[in-house]
Amino acid sequence: MDTSSLGEETTTYENRIQMKDGYDLPVYGIAEGTFYKLHVPAMACICISFICAMSDIFYSFYHQNCSKFFEWSKSERFVVYMALCDALFNVSHFSDHLHIVVTKSFPTPKGLCAFYGFMLAEFITAQSFMVNIVAINVFVLIYVRKHLYFGRWDYRLLVYIFGVPAVGGIIVGALDQFGPSGAFCTFDAIKGKTTYIFFTTVPLLLILVMNIGLYTLSWGRIYRETHEIKDSLGKSSRALQASHKVAKTMSLFVTAFFIQWWALAVFGVCQLIGNIPPLLLSFVTTFSNIGGLLNGIVFIFIIKRKSEKVGTNGSLKSGSGGTGSTPIHSVSHSTQAIKNSEV
């Protein structure tokens, strides 16, 4: 079986004839016998992701007051926004894969493929911005003792995570940069190479590194402060337990994001080098399509943590009164802020 990479295949065809756009390329995998190995697992992952994303949304609105959505905790609203991104991403990307599987050709008319590419770019970027905001929010909470204010109805957040990518996508579309990549519709493999680098590869790599850095710094500070509290108040400190739970929740957010998008980030780097292993493309079409599943797991932990918090608050109300002042004033404020944030 031919094991040439997608990048090598594209280069070969470019050298053989003058390419106008991605439609001049062959559909990746047909000649190599890897066509169904690429698309079938991707479609299966997309279906699982979509089911999980819709389950998150329905569960959230069924168990809480819909009219008070913007009064929900930040973490609960974040999960809904992420699930919405996953669901819309899944619908458009599944349609793209299904069209290619049925026809063994790229979607036509060209505007349809461009639409799929736009949706892909929109929701990949929106999720990247969303998780980055979560990381920044936690960092500011821990180090500055303040909450990020997203405005009425979260309009600042929503304009940033959905509006900015949409404007960028419209500009890219107007410049005719969306089209077949060889495997599916995203940035055109011939005309959109540079645009892909600056719209997806570079921002995704920067956000991955930034998120890991912010979460590492935030967790480190929480860890140090909980040890100070432990030395002052003992092992039974409720603040110690709350801080540990927050740290675990934060780790889940960054871990889910990393698992989903590491392959696409590496894919972008390999594309710059000009050598894309076929196995990596399979990783991209698998990991990038399980966002709903990963964020669903995070949602389960958030629900569990909320239930534990309700139980703890109930126990406190039925328990004894105050316990005296805390000798570490700044640490107590930090821990109280962590409790109230529910991030």
Image (tube, helix red, strand yellow):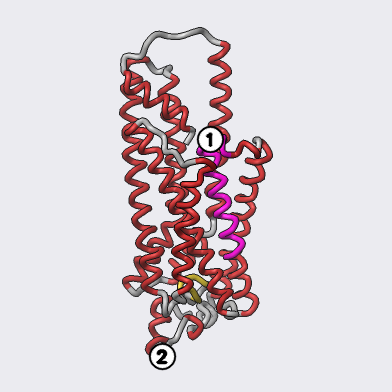
As drawn, the residue found furthest toward the bottom would be: 17
Which label number is shown at residue 2? Answer: none
The residue at 31%/14% (across/down) is 327
Residue under label 1, please give it: 73
Q: Nearer the viewer, mark 1 or mark 2?
A: 1
Q: Which residues are magenta?
A: 70-93
- Count of marks overlaid on the render: 2
Residue type, mark 2 in image: Gln
Q: Nearer the viewer, residue 122 or 271?
A: 122
Q: Is residue 273 visible?
A: yes
The residue at 49%/8% (across/down) is 321
Q: Main secondary structure of the magenta part?
A: helix
Disc 2 on helix, strand or loop?
loop
Q: Quadrant of residue 45?
A: bottom right
Disc 1 on helix, strand or loop?
loop
Magenta stretch holds residue 223: no
Nearer the N terminus, badge 1 or badge 2?
Answer: 2
Residue 206: x %, y % from top left: 34, 55
The residue at 35%/58% (across/down) is 205
Q: Nearer the viewer, residue 256 or 310?
A: 310
Magenta stretch holds residue 88: yes
Mark-to-mark CA distance, 1 and 2: 55 Å
Q: Few, some or many C-alpha atoms within 10 Å of disc 1 (few <14, some 14-19, many ≥20)?
A: few
Relative to 312, is 6 on the left or the right?
Answer: left
Residue type, mark 1 in image: Ser
Residue 13: x %, y % from top left: 42, 86
Q: Nearer the viewer, residue 184 or 4?
A: 184
Residue under label 2, please give it: 18
